[in-house]
Amino acid sequence: MQPNPNQPESDNRTEIAPGVRVHPDALRFTFARSSGPGGQNVNRRSTKAELRVALIDMGLNERVRRRLKRIAGKRLIEDNPDDDTPDRGEILIVASEHRTQGRNKSACLERLRALIIEAQAIPKKRIPTKPSRRARQRRLDEKSRQSEKKQRRTKPGRDD
């Protein structure tokens, strides 16, 4: 059977978010013993999952990478924090709330997916507006009413 030239070659990349595909080797998982629920099992099994993925391996455009760097916060590990290059560093996501390695691994992938989706959303530009003249007048009138109300509370004959 000949390959169809209209279809892309089947690659073994994994889709981690809409439109974002990564090679499975780019997703580096490590497992360790975790604290929390599990009874005696927690002392014997390495169920805590840590996911590391380099920004450059995700194939995101520059704007999305910059937003992802900002959104990732403390999950971003950088070689040189002073460098503003958007493709430097990697994201570290840790999950240990489940009792099995598989569920914690899935939780890591889901958190990475949520981060990428949030970074892909283009934020709306804020358009600064001024309060109307009527709104400014209402605010001043309310302040005057409050002031008068408080003035009426003072004891008569007291001059401060």
Image (spheres, rainbow, N blue to C red):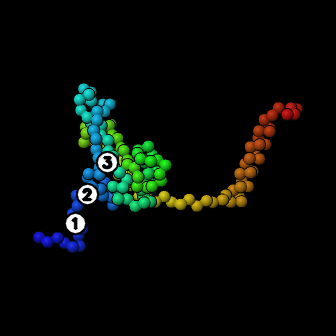
The x and y percentages for residue 95 are 33, 40
Q: Amino acid at mark 3?
A: Leu
Residue 9's disc is 1
Classify 10 Å Cα crowding around label 1: few (below 14), some (14-19), many (20 and above). Answer: few
Task: Give the spatial CA distance, label 2 vs label 1.
Answer: 11 Å
Which quarter of the image is occupied by the N terminus?
Answer: bottom left
Say whether marks 1 and 3 touch (CB < 8 Å): no
Q: Residues within 10 Å of mark 3 (few under 14, many from 20)?
A: some
Between the C-alphas of marks 1 and 3, the distance is: 25 Å
- The residue beneath circle 2 is 13
Q: Is residue 4 visible?
A: yes
Circles 2 and 3 in contact, beta carbons < 8 Å: no
Between circles 2 and 3, the one closer to the viewer is 2
- Choose between 65 and 106: the one closer to the eye: 65
> What whole-number distance in Å separates the C-alpha atoms at marks 2 and 3?
14 Å
Q: Nearer the viewer, residue 17 or 143?
A: 17
Q: Give the structural element (helix, strand or loop) at label 3.
A: helix
Left or right of 141 on screen, residue 107: left
| Position of residue 18 measured from the top left corner of the image (x, y, whole percent) | 33, 58
Residue at x 49% of width, y 49% of height: 82
Q: Is residue 20 left or right of residue 81?
A: left
Quadrant in the rendering for residue 32: top left
